[in-house]
Amino acid sequence: MTLARWPAWLFAALAAVIVTALLTVPGVGHAAPALLSQGHSAASSSAENATFPASSAVDGDSGTRWSSQAADPQWLAVDLGGPHSLSQVVLNWEAAYAKAFQIQVSTDNVNWTNLTPVTAGNVGVQTLSVSGTGRYVRMYGTQRATQWGYSLWEFQVYGDDTAAACNATVNSALNQPVLASSTQDAGAFPASSAVDGNPGTRWSSVAADPQWIRVDLGSVRQVCGVELDWEAAFASSFQIQVSTDGNSWSNLTQPMAGLAGNQTLTVNGSGRYVRMNGAQRATQWGYSLWEFIIHTVGAPPTTTTTTQPPQGDCPWVKSTAPVAQRVDQLMAAMTNAQKVVVLHGNGATGPYIGNTDPIPALCVPAMGLQDGPAGVGDSLDGVTELPDPTALAATWDVNAAKQYGTVMGQEFAGKGANVVLGPTINIVRDPRWGRDFETYSEDPYHAGQTAVGAVQGIQGQGVMAQVKHAAAYNVEGGASRGTPSDNVIIDDRTLHEIYLPAFQTVLTQGQAASVMCAYNQINGTPACQDSAVMNTALKQATGWDGFIGSDWGSATGGAPQLANGGLDMEMPGGAFFGQALIDAVNQGKVSQSTLDDMTRRVLTQMFKFGLFDHGATGNTGAVVTSAAHTQVAQDVAAQGSVLLKNNGVLPLSASSLKSIALLGGDAIDPQNIGGGSAKVNPSPAAVNPINGITKRAGSGVSVQWVAGAGEHVQTPDIPAAVALAQKSDVAVVFASYGESETDDLSSIDLQFSQNDLISAVAAANPRTIVVLNTGSAVTMPWLNNVAGVIEGWYPGQENGDAIASLLFGDVNPSGKLPVTFPRSMADMPTAGAQQFPGANDRIEYSEGMNVGYRWYDARNITPLFPFGFGLSYTTFGFSGLTVSAQANGSATVRATVTNTGSKAGAEVPQLYIGQPAANGEPPHQLKGYQKITLTPGQSQVVTFTVTPRDLAHWNGSAWTTNTGSYGVFVGDSSRNLPLTGTIAVTAGS
């Protein structure tokens, strides 16, 4: 039964009344306790999403709340800034409360003491008397009372208002992770020298303003003093600043001048990160500190050590020894506490969306992970907004994918990121999925080959690719994403033949450094705990040595389940792979060999990609786009656009045209990219269609625009669009729908009167062309009435110039559909609600292997446009099929492709294999393709190698090839395969 959530205003009102009553009870002979928690730093094991962060439970606003993921256990902790005596905890529960929880206290955020026995929560305000002392207080929930997570409007901790004294004799910065804006020489004057306790070593910056050095104290602490031991190159103006997240900073001092020698400052503030932020140098040199000492209230950070060797005594750095040997050297010097540092994020949202801490004592650098699959995301500027990955897949060109990936790799490297959170390679199972635009294809072979090109391009620039999301992640489901209702029910054969091959291909052929596991469950097991997928299919079956990281908050359950299931890195924090993982190893729940394998996988990729051989390069503020990059964006947008219909109206001729009507909101405010983690900011500003077309048409052609209707049009005015179309030589209507992470579409029909606009314009002007910008398939009730249709996907910032080049024939269309376009949703394999988006806590993959074109072929359903389809301004013919006998299990297929038209153009011959009916496979499946360019009359022989794996099927435990006759089909789409032959398999395997 689904529990209805009570409205926020009702809880807020009740909470205000109850809390006021509690706080106005007459005294009983002692001072009223002080509220200690409000406004302090809070952390949690997880958050349902960014709308419900941990900070909402300590903000004093009973109308905002923290909500966790729907899993056990979960916790919410608040840092009081220093140790306090505690007397009372008040929990204001939302309808999603705890059935069993405890209040716990800690002095170091590692070791916890119970202040209450196991207690049941209740909807509303719950007041508990406690007695204890500590700096950190948390609610630790072990059992939920509902199907939802844990949810608190407020978490209030009361006690004394006097904190412990400043510990001025201990340096809390000693050997802590440290970063600097620059170093004069990373080998001689690294940032770590300022926190190594050695007054004879120093950090020195480059000679420029401003510069900073930042120390990570490991957790939020009350900072009470700072000592700066300046070299002769000191600051004439600087401030001491503090931050809880390494991104937003508060000043602890006014701007002040430094001095050569020791400078001692008294400060007061709380934060995890402390930095000296220098605005002006006193000399011609940079800034230089022998030591940067920080004093805090209470004990020093638990990670502080004075027994480790100082940075620089690391023989594995810049070594020419093999990577495996360097990893062995480093791991031999690591404690388990140090190993887990590289296995989880530090929870900060800056400088990157994901960040790991460095280990200066062992010269282990930090890593930065950044979205996403269509370019540098997370609102960073100075980057290229590339076409969406669906447009890339529609090029059917591995070389284009490599160029696309190269641009990505160069820009991520320029921004200083080490790991690209992409590409997305999940199968397009249903065109309503909110993330269809950021993935490639409905076919695993096509998705895998596109991914190989993109990953090779990315990693060729020294940046790791993290392909995502393993596995069977094909529904967003809104608020249900990552909950128990996000449970994919799928048979093992379908999982191995449809949803895993693209991942295995990109690991074996593309050598991707990393994989991200998904939010969903697979047959009741969370994907990030699924050993059959992660350990067996991805690691063991491929011999892959990379690491698997979690999506943000997709790691749930517990350290043993995650580590034993095959997860290697938790993001964005360390709720499970910090102290909890150390505890699990100590308790024998996770073996030492498993921890070592996890660590080895991460370190291996760090060494392979040179993180130990060079200092940090690039920064988030750098401008990394270029003319060469924007040209690649334009080329991919043009090459990936698919000409679906043309009755001869295209290409346009500027010399014979006098007027063009551009209609629809997307002509001026286009849908260039989808939303969520794949969103990218254009730089410079995007070229919209009206500007690109006007420029290409020239001064002799009148180009006018009327919105008429569209997703971005507030008040549709179809009559005005019709009037302009009637008096124009040609009408071009732009239409779109938007897609975004977290939200699925309810329909694949155009919305906001766009179909009405197209029909009305087509009736007014027979030379009407429709340009679609959609993330996947779309219905076209007006198709028979228009002269031409181009599917441009989400074309990125060079939209206008790309579509102009296609309309006027500067580029001959060569894109092919990477997904089937159905005539209606009723024809789709996932038309039922149980299949998409799911019902009754299950998403049934009952269509089995019949995904995309496989379904339409198996059911003999005619689609609107088939997989692999795309027209050109020229024509092509296929002839001369030959199929060789198998040699060492492989056969060779050859076919001749001829340009039979009058224009140069590109074609994509496609190879499909059909297995004997007894094998139980779909009618035929893509196993090869090539993109070739031919001049008029030119022919070319294309060659395909059919491997034993291409003929095999999954038998439940292994890939098997049965004897029999296997069909060979070659053509230009899944429904146009004029060349046919057979391969006789006489010996099974």
Image (cartoon, rainbow, N blue to C red):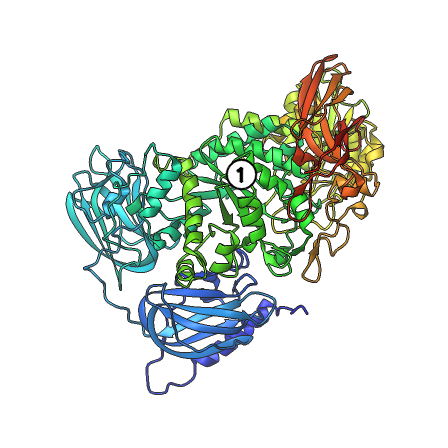
Specify the quadrant of the image occupied by residue 269: bottom left
Where does the N terminus fall, quadrant-wise?
bottom right
Q: Is residue 177 visible?
A: yes
Q: Position of residue 500 (x, y in %)?
A: 62, 44
Where does the C terminus fall, quadrant-wise?
top right
Q: Is residue 523 above or below residue 140?
A: above
Q: Position of residue 205 (x, y in %)?
A: 27, 37
Q: Is residue 669 left or right of residue 27?
A: right
Q: Is residue 691 visible?
A: no
Identified at 55% across, 63% down, the residue is 71
In the image, 427 versus 349, the foreground residue is 427
Q: Residue furthest left?
A: 261
In the image, 446 versus 655, the foreground residue is 446
Q: Position of residue 636 (x, y in %)?
A: 61, 28
Q: Residue furthest top?
A: 937
Q: Position of residue 264 (x, y in %)?
A: 18, 53
Identified at 42% across, 58% down, the residue is 581
* Badge count: 1
* Three-letter amino acid code of the residue under disc 1: Asn
Identified at 71% across, 46% down, the residue is 430
CA neighbours of label 1 inside 10 A, class few (<14), some (14 to 19), many (20+): many
Q: Is residue 932 left or right of residue 624?
A: right
Q: Is residue 761 above or below residue 537?
A: above
Q: Is residue 228 above or below residue 17?
A: above
Q: Residue furthest front?
A: 987
Query: What residue did someone put label 1 on?
Result: 681
In the image, 561 versus 827, the foreground residue is 561
Q: Is residue 97 left or right of residue 168?
A: right
Disc 1 element: loop
Identified at 70% across, 62% down, the residue is 840
